[in-house]
Amino acid sequence: MGFTPAPEEDDAFWMRRALAEAARGLGRVEPNPMVGAVVVRDGRLVRVGHHERFGGPHAEVFALGAAGAAARGATLYVTLEPCCHHGKTPPCTDAVLTSGIARAVVATPDPFPRVAGGGLRRLEAAGVAVTVGVEAAAARRLNGPFFKRQATGRPYVVAKWAMTLDGKIACASGDSKWISGPESRAAVHDLRGRMDAIVVGIGTALADDPELTARPPGPRTPLRVVLDREARLPLDGRLARTARAVPVLVVAGPDAPGDRVGALAAAGVEVLPLEGDAAGRVGSLLDELGRRGVANVLVEGGGTALGAFWDAGEVDAVEVFLAPVLEGGAGEFGPLRGRGVARMADATRLAGLEVARRGPDVWLRGDVPRPWRGAS
Ligand SMILES: NC(=O)c1ccc[n+]([C@@H]2O[C@H](COP(=O)([O-])OP(=O)(O)OC[C@H]3O[C@@H](n4cnc5c(N)ncnc54)[C@H](OP(=O)(O)O)[C@@H]3O)[C@@H](O)[C@H]2O)c1
């Protein structure tokens, strides 16, 4: 006797397949969401599709186009509500209706104001059976940057650091090369190549003279941002020297010395003056990056800069490379300076933890609970 899954289990199975398809757009579609679609008929996979690149056709169009006449009477699984407006491409609801799809299963509504339930209503009004909310939490997690930007106008912030087993990101002298091994450092380059911006504090720029590029390059070329109230970024450092090839943005204070600002500008560095305290400047920077279409920001340190993003309540996910290295000492350089909490009960517990080995190191990634994530 064969096992027949309940229909709702079928739905979850096929939606997970669509989510895997969606993830193929990582690094290529931002600031659009990653979307995957699967056409299923009589319990069998007909065709899959995903949103492949920013401005390109949507996932449904790929899957339905490939399915052709086989889509008639079939079920469409799609990780985000089909759009119903003319954007860079025609409405996907038209493609769904023309295809003859009988049922549409959708992971989450699209929060984009020009869609926001309109696509679902359009399909239902035309007689398509619509189910919403299948694997919704996984879909919202996959597209955290899209959902955060829609809710707040700000990009998604990943805080990353490499740390000794006794909790330090540098020695007392400030030296930090290298805590983690080559496998971890390769993973960081891979991460950078999927980001739109990388942020460091001037302390790190002075101590490490980092280049902050992805080597080898990834699908995206991140803007390099330095928090630097006095515009102290050295002109002969790697960042300023490469500013004409890969953009550098120095976030200065309103009172930064004019000659320093002028010299950086002459070297091809953009200087953005921002007022306010540390948390206010973090918020203003994220607003500005959101306006520029930045979807993902990586904050690489040091502890002062990371602490400022943390205290501002703007860290959305954490990636830590934990090395089997012991330093000893009181440890001036912790990964998250800033205010801290008085009671362990007030500390933040990460959700959705992922753990893996990277050579001799352990890599951890977790999500910070944030209001825009919603209940799921
Ligand atoms: N292991 C790792 O993963 C890792 C990663 C990075 C760095 N590090 C190490 O960390 C050390 C540097 O850390 P750090 O804490 O001294 O310096 P930092 O966080 O790199 O830079 C801090 C400085 O950034 C400036 N800043 C401007 N706006 C800010 C804002 N809104 N919020 C916070 N800072 C702002 C401030 O200087 P102004 O007042 O002059 O603007 C502040 O003193 C180095 O030894 C480096 O090697 C380790």
Image: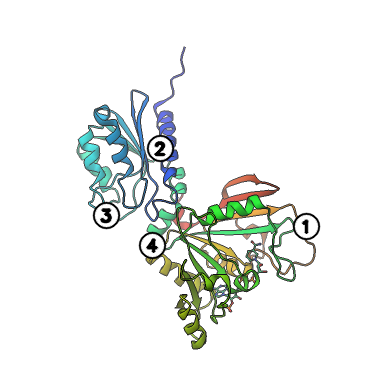
Q: Which residue is mark 4?
A: 293
Q: Position of residue 49 (x, y in %)?
A: 35, 38
Q: Using the image, determine if residue 235 lies above or below residue 155.
A: below
- Marks 1 and 2, the one that precedes in the sequence: 2
Q: Residue at x 43, y 58 (%)?
A: 295
Corner quadrant of residue 35: top left
Q: Amino acid at mark 4?
A: Gly
Helix, strand or loop for disc 2? helix
Ligand 1 is within 8 Å of the C-beta of the residue at disc 2 = no
State if disc 1 and disc 3 touch (CB < 8 Å): no
Query: Disc 4 and disc 2: Cα gap in Å?
Result: 26 Å
Ligand 1 is within 8 Å of the C-beta of the residue at disc 1 = no
Q: Amino acid at mark 1?
A: Leu
264 left or right of 179 in image: left
Query: Disc 1 and disc 4: Cα gap in Å?
Result: 41 Å
- Marks 3 and 2, the one that precedes in the sequence: 2
- Marks 1 and 4, the one that precedes in the sequence: 4
Residue 326: which numbered mark, if any?
A: 1
Nearer-the-camera pick, 3 or 293: 293
Q: Residues within 10 Å of mark 2 (few under 14, many from 20)?
A: many
Q: Amino acid at mark 2?
A: Ala
**Residue 350 seen by the camera:** no
Q: Which residue is mark 2?
A: 18
Query: Disc 1 and disc 2: Cα gap in Å?
Result: 44 Å
Q: Residue at x 42, y 66 (%)?
A: 289
- Marks 3 and 4, the one that precedes in the sequence: 3
283 left or right of 175 in image: left
Nearer-the-camera pick, 1 or 183: 183
**Residue 335 seen by the camera:** yes
Helix, strand or loop for disc 4? loop
Q: Which residue is mark 3?
A: 114
Helix, strand or loop for disc 3? loop
